[in-house]
Amino acid sequence: MNKFNELINSNKPVLVDFFADWCAPCKMIAPELVSLKKNIGDTMSIVKINVDKNKQLASQFQVKGVPTMILFKEGKILWRESGYMNSNQLKNTLSPFIS
């Protein structure tokens, strides 16, 4: 938990993907996140959090469905979305937050 808090409080944007192993859209978005990371490089970190193994964290951020992606910077939520998005949609949506 301390490492997570340290990560989301950095001045580098952090995209957190709340997922579950049993979730089909979560499995579909995984390669999209890999593709996104290749496109954006080190301008943003991407972290995956399994909601079944991290129930407290999922509850803290009111994750009701998976996949839910939340973009943090300096401890603040800049953007949040639930559901599948492909890498182009993600890049276009997140580009205003990436320096």
Image: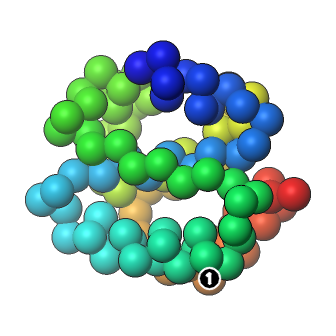
- Residue located 35% across and 56% down the image: 67
Which amino acid is tagged 1? Asn
Of all residues, the one furthest to the right in this rendering is 99
Q: Quadrant of the N terminus?
A: top left
Reading the image, the residue beneath label 1 is: 88
Q: Nearer the viewer, residue 2 or 69?
A: 2
Residue 53: percent from left, percent from top? 19, 34
Q: Is residue 82 above or below residue 31?
A: above
Residue 69: percent from left, percent from top? 49, 52
The answer to whether residue 93 is visible is yes
- Residue 30 falls in image quadrant: bottom left
- Residue located 65% across and 39% down the image: 72
Q: How many marks?
A: 1
Q: Quadrant of the C terminus?
A: bottom right
Q: Is residue 21 above or below residue 33?
A: above
- Residue located 37% across and 38% down the image: 63
Q: Secondary structure at mark 1?
A: helix
Q: Nearer the viewer, residue 46 or 78?
A: 46
* Category of crowding for the residue at label 1, using alpha-carbon neighbours closer than 10 angstroms: few (below 14), some (14–19), many (at least 20): few
Say left or right for 46 vs 63: right
Residue 66: percent from left, percent from top? 31, 53
Q: Nearer the viewer, residue 45 or 26?
A: 45
Say left or right for 24 vs 40: left
